[in-house]
Image (cartoon, helix red, strand yellow):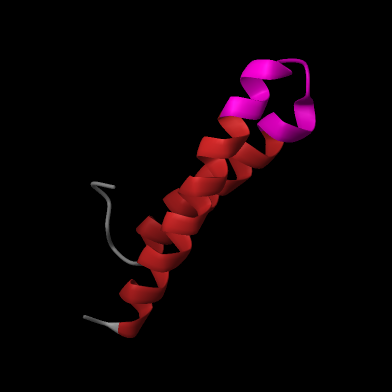
Amino acid sequence: MDDLLREFLTESSESLDTVDNQLVQFEQDPNNAKILDNIFRLVHTIKGTCGFLGLPRL
């Protein structure tokens, strides 16, 4: 497996763990814009990296 793809998978897994935890926090505090901003930022980063790596279906 390509090193770049391996790094992407590792970072994406970590980011998705963070998103999972922050979604739980956001359920408890739905007015917290910082949590929502961070969720969007992490998902946007994953999406952008998918595009960079030529993985449009992700």
The dominant secondary structure in magenta is helix
Q: Which image quadrant: the N terminus? A: bottom left
Q: Position of residue 48 (x, y in %)?
A: 46, 54
Q: How many marks?
A: 0
The part of the chain drawn in magenta is: 24-36
Q: Say if 33 sits above or below 39 in the image.
A: above
Residue 44 appears in view: no
**In the rendered image, which quarter is residue 53 located in?**
bottom left
x 29%, y 47%: residue: 58
Q: Say if 13 sits above or below 4 in the image.
A: above
Within the magenta stretch, is there residue 26? yes
Q: Nearer the viewer, residue 19 or 42?
A: 19
Q: Say if 3 sits above or below 31 in the image.
A: below
Q: Say if 18 sits above or below 52 in the image.
A: above
Q: Position of residue 54 (x, y in %)?
A: 28, 63
x 71%, y 33%: residue: 35
Lateral position of residue 29 relative to residue 39, left or right: right
Q: Position of residue 15 (x, y in %)?
A: 52, 52
Within the magenta stretch, is there residue 49? no
